[in-house]
């Protein structure tokens, strides 16, 4: 299989961390993609023009990181990151939904900041960032959701926090003091080999 | 179970169609929630302020429509709308992800249009419209394989077509996608789809 890939995409990172954690990364060939380039051939694989997109061996293409990660998890690697059923499944998918959602809000803030100054709308930035903060408050209040063996929820949160810290650390400020349980969990998680191997690097 | 519900959200509509198709109407209470109203968002059990959100009978809160439908499918015994592992599963989930991505692009266009005209980005709207048009062409190419069975893929495609028919009438997708148009005219007759309708967000109080 082939993965349409970009180096700093947090959703691509989710896929790669998943592949590394379940031991099937060597089966994936990476195809570098500049999805900002209007001439990029990514649209031949994903009409939405986004990465990650996974081209399966039968030629069909999966888009959207939750589906791609679920597919990889089904391939029978050494481990699983998505429990098949029961409370563990819903806890993992709940945290994945929270993490992907807070990341989408952070990306919305970043997009707003990338507009020409006279087209920016502070209210949109404030609303989106408030959702990021509320979600971190929510997780901080119930750190038990970060316990247990590595699952897709933890992978999603690790990649989301890693991207926000990489791209917009000035928005986060001293976040480890404000959300200490999340911060100490993240520092432990970010030390995993799968996370160290995929840390975003300045181009 | 309690579902945070807005009749204007295509993602809520997809979840409600799933509830109906699985025969779970009596087990899911709908709680009206307008994600554009601050008081509704503050009272919601979802820190992201999004609909749909499902509160389970165990007190767990799930978000993102694919996860909610996954949970409902398990609650109904499994395999009703999400096929068991195998090729059919990935076909259904692939179509759902594509249709959801198109609906997200539509929502981004809608939000952009709510900004003051001088703060709108024509380029951003054009970028999202182009993604929708390309994805429509991709679905037209596989319209013959969609079939009339309800699963997460066909339900998502149907709701997406309802949404863009209202929001992007000028795309004229029925002319550019004749096979998809025929499929939709048949699929939309399902009782789950005719029982409720997607309403214009500007008409929700």
Image: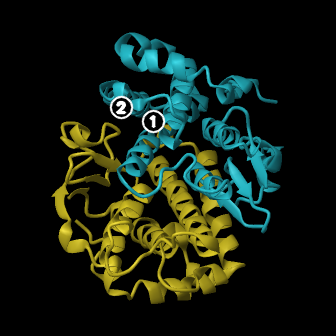
Chain colours: A yellow, B cyan
Q: Is residue B134 above or below residue B176?
A: below
Q: From the viewer's perspective, tell me whether residue A132 is left or right of residue A66.
A: right
- Mark 1 → mark 2, Cα distance in angstroms: 7 Å
User: How many numbered badges does the structure rendering display?
Assistant: 2
What x and y, as percent, mark residue A42?
A: 23, 43
- Name the quadrant of the N terminus of chain A: bottom left
Q: Is residue B149 above or below residue B24?
A: above
Residue placed under numbered mark 1 in the picture? B102
Observer-nearest residue: B167 or A36?
A: B167
Q: Residues within 10 Å of mark 2 (few under 14, many from 20)?
A: many
Q: Is residue A149 above or below residue A162?
A: below
Going 29% across and 42% down the picture, which residue do you hit? Answer: A46
Observer-nearest residue: B47 or A174?
A: B47
Residue A190 quadrant: bottom left
Q: From the viewer's perspective, tell me whether residue B54 is left or right of residue B144.
A: right
What x and y, as percent, mark residue B189?
A: 61, 20
Observer-nearest residue: B184 or B137?
A: B184
Q: From the viewer's perspective, tell me whether residue B44 is left or right of residue A60.
A: right
Q: Residues within 10 Å of mark 1 (few under 14, many from 20)?
A: many
Marks 1 and 2 share the same chain: yes
Residue A135 quadrant: bottom right
Query: The residue tagged with tag 2: helix, strand or loop?
Result: helix
Q: Earlier in the sequence, mark 1 or mark 2?
A: 1
Contact, mark 1 vs mark 2 (Cβ under 8 Å): yes
Observer-nearest residue: B142 or B200?
A: B142
Q: Is residue B119 visible?
A: no
Q: Which mark is residue B135?
A: 2
């Amino acid at each position: 299989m082939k993965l349409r890939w970009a180096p700093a995409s947090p959703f691509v990172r989710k896929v790669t961390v998943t592949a590394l954690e379940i031991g099937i990364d060597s089966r994936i060939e990476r195809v570098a993609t500049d999805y900002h380039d209007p001439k990029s051939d990514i649209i031949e694989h994903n009409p939405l023009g986004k990465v990650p997109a996974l081209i399966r061996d039968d030629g069909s293409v999966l888009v959207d990181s939750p589906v791609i990660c679920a597919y990889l998890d089904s391939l029978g690697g050494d481990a699983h990151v998505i429990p098949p059923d029961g409370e563990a499944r819903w806890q993992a998918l709940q945290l994945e939904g929270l993490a992907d959602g807070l990341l989408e809000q952070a990306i919305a803030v970043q997009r707003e900041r990338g507009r020409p100054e006279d087209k920016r709308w502070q209210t949109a930035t404030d609303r989106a960032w408030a959702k990021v903060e509320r979600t971190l408050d929510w997780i901080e209040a119930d750190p038990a959701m970060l316990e247990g063996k590595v699952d897709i929820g933890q992978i999603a949160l690790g990649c989301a926090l890693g991207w926000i810290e990489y791209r917009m650390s000035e928005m986060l400020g001293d976040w480890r003091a404000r959300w200490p349980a999340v911060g100490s969990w993240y520092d432990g998680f970010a030390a995993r080999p799968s996370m160290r191997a995929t840390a975003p690097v300045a181009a | 179970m309690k579902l945070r519900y807005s009749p204007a959200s295509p993602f809520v509509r997809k979840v409600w169609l799933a509830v109906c198709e699985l025969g779970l109407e009596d087990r899911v209470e709908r709680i009206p929630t307008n994600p554009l109203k601050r008081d509704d968002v503050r009272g919601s059990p979802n820190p992201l302020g999004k609909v749909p959100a499902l509160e389970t009978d165990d007190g767990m809160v799930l978000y993102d429509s694919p996860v909610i439908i996954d949970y409902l499918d398990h609650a109904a015994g499994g395999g009703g709308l999400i096929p068991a592992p195998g090729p059919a599963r990935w076909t259904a989930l692939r179509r759902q992800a594509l249709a959801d991505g198109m609906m997200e692009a539509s929502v981004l266009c809608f939000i952009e249009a709510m900004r003051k005209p001088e703060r709108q980005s024509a380029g951003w709207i054009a970028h999202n419209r182009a993604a929708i048009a390309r994805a429509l062409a991709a679905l037209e190419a596989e319209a013959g394989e969609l079939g009339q069975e309800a699963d997460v893929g066909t339900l998502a495609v149907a709701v997406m077509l309802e949404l863009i028919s209202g929001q992007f009438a000028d795309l004229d997708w029925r002319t550019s996608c004749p096979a998809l148009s025929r499929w939709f005219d048949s699929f939309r007759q399902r009782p789950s789809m005719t029982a409720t309708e997607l309403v214009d967000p500007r008409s929700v109080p």
